[in-house]
Amino acid sequence: MALAIRSGSLRKPSEMMKIIITTFVGVIFGFFLGISFPTISLTKMNLPSSLIPSIDLTYIEDKYSGLSTQTLLNVWSTLKSNRALLFADRGNQTKIWIPTNPKGAERLPPGIIESESDLFLRRLWGLPSEDLTITPKYLVTFTVGYNQKKNIDAAIKKFSENFTILLFHYDGRTSEWEEFEWSKRAIHVSARKQSKWWYAKRFLHPDIVAPYDYIFVWDEDLGLDHFNAEEYLKLVRKYGLEISQPGLEPNSGLTWEMTKKRDNSEVHKDAKERNGWCGDPHLPPCAAFVEIMATVFSRDAWRCVWHMVQACSTNDLVHGWGLDFALRKCVEPAHEKIGVIDAQWIVHQGVPTLGNQGQAYSGKAPWEGVRERCKREWAMFQDRLTNAEKEYLEELGVDSSNLTADNQKSIMD
Ligand SMILES: *[C@@H]1O[C@H](CO)[C@@H](O)[C@H](O)[C@H]1NC(C)=O
Ligand SMILES: *[C@@H]1O[C@H](CO)[C@@H](O)[C@H](O)[C@H]1NC(C)=O
Ligand SMILES: *[C@@H]1O[C@H](CO)[C@@H](O)[C@H](O)[C@H]1NC(C)=O
C-alpha cells in the first residue's frame, strides 16, 4: 500500500524526465540520420546506457525487424519531428498517435504507411523486385461487351507493352476473351450492366492508378486504324495537355466542332461552333472541352476528375453530355490544358452498346430509358456542382450570383 502511494507520487517528475530524454534522444537520432549509416543498429548506438531502459529500443527494433534499419531511422526521425508521439513506458506498448497520418491510420508509424499501390500483375514466387520485366507507365481501360470483341482485339494491339490493360465487362462474359493472347496480361473486372463511370469510380481510385502517367478511359466502339498510343502521348506531352482525346473522323454522326479531327494539324485547343453556342470562346463547347468517349487524363487531372464524378452515368447515346462540360473544373487554365490530338485520330463507330442493355418500361424503348436517365443524372450533377461552388463562395463572402449561368448548359437533343 505504502509502496503504491510512493511510486504514484514519483510519477510526475519521472514523466518530465522522460520527455526531456525523448527530446534528447531525438536530437541524437537526427544527428545519426544526418550521417546516415545504412546498417546502424539502434541498440548498438553509443547512447548513455542509462537511457536505453527508459525507451525500450530493443523492443521496438524487434517489432520492426522486417524493415531495414534505414527505414526504421526514417520512421524515428518522423516521429521525432512529430510531437504527437506518446511514450507510455509502463510495461505498456509504445503508443503512437500521428494526426497527420491518413484518417484511421493514426496509430501507425508513418514509415509503414502505404497510401498508394498499382495494378501491376505479379507472380507468386521469386523476388518481388524481379516480378516485372517492364513497368507499365500508362493505363488503358475499355468498357466492353463480348459482341465488340473484334473491335477491342484490334484496338488493344495499338497499345504497347508499356500499358496496363484493364477491361470492364458489362455483360458478364469474361472467360470468352481468353482466346486472345493479350487477355492473359489484361485485368478483367466484371459487373453486369454498369456504365463506364460506375466502373471508373470504383476501380480507378487515384491512389491505385498513381503509378501511371496517363490513364485512358475509353469506350468500346472506337476504330483505331489511324492511332498509335505512344505517338499520341508524345504529342500530349509536347503540348502540355492534362485532358485530351484523339480527333474524331468527321462522319455522319453528330460531332462537336471541337472534337473533329483537323487535317495538317498536330493538336488544336479551340473551335468555332454554330452561332450562339459558345458564350465564351474559352469555355465548352468551343474550348476547354473534350468528349468522354475516348478521354485521356494525366495522373493529376484524373485525381481531380475521380473526386468529381459520383453516380454520373453517361454513355455514347448522348455523346457524353454532361461530364465533358465539367472536366475543365479540374485543370487551370483549362483552355490551354485540354485539347484534341489531330495527328493520331480515331473513328467513333457509334454502335449503340450499353444503351441496349437497358430495359423497356412504361412503353419506352430501352435506349430511351437510358437516355432519360442520363439527362436526369446530368441535371443532378449540375445542381450538385453549382450548389457546391455557391456554398464555397458564400463562405468566402464572394458574390456567386452568376455561377448558375456558367454551369448550367441546357441539354440539346
Ligand atoms: C497501461 O498503462 C496504464 C497507466 O499508465 C495502466 O492503467 C494500464 O493498465 C496499462 N495497460 C496495460 C495493458 O498494461
Ligand atoms: C516503352 O517505353 C520505353 C521507355 O519510355 C520506350 O523506350 C519504348 O520505346 C516504349 N515502347 C514502345 C513500343 O513504344
Ligand atoms: C461574374 O463572372 C465574372 C467572370 O467570371 C466576374 O468577373 C464577375 O465578378 C462575376 N460576378 C458578377 C456579379 O458579375
Image (cartoon, rainbow, N blue to C red):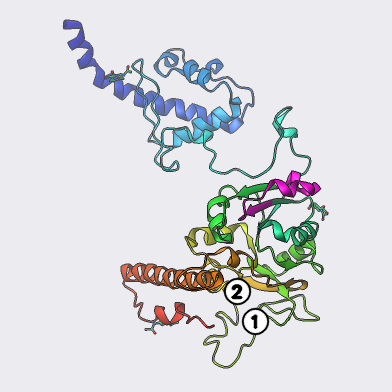
Label 2 Cα crowd, 10 Å radius (few <14 / some 14-19 / many 20+):
some
Three-letter residue code for mark 1? Leu
What distance separates the C-alpha of mark 1 from that of mark 2?
A: 8 Å
Residue 203 percent across, percent down from the top left: 57, 50
- Is 305 drawn above or below residue 246 in the view shown? above
User: First in sequence: mark 1 or mark 2?
Assistant: 1
Circle 2: residue type: His
Q: Quadrant of residue 227?
A: bottom right
Judge left or right: residue 329 versus residue 271: left
Q: Which residue is mark 1?
A: 254
Residue under numbered circle 2: 319
Residue drawn at x 57%, y 20% is 65
Quadrant into which the C terminus falls: bottom right
Q: Nearer the viewer, residue 335 or 271?
A: 271
Above or below 176: residue 381: below
Q: Is residue 333 visible?
A: no
Q: Give the magenta-colored segment's residue range.
A: 166-186
Residue 264 image offset from top left, x and y in percent: 81, 81
| Residues at circles 1 and 2 in contact by the CB criterion of under 8 Å | yes
Residue 22 within the segment the image draws in magenta: no
Residue 179 colored in magenta in the image: yes
Query: What percent of the width, then of the height, locates residue 185?
Result: 74, 45
Q: Is residue 7 left or right of residue 219?
A: left
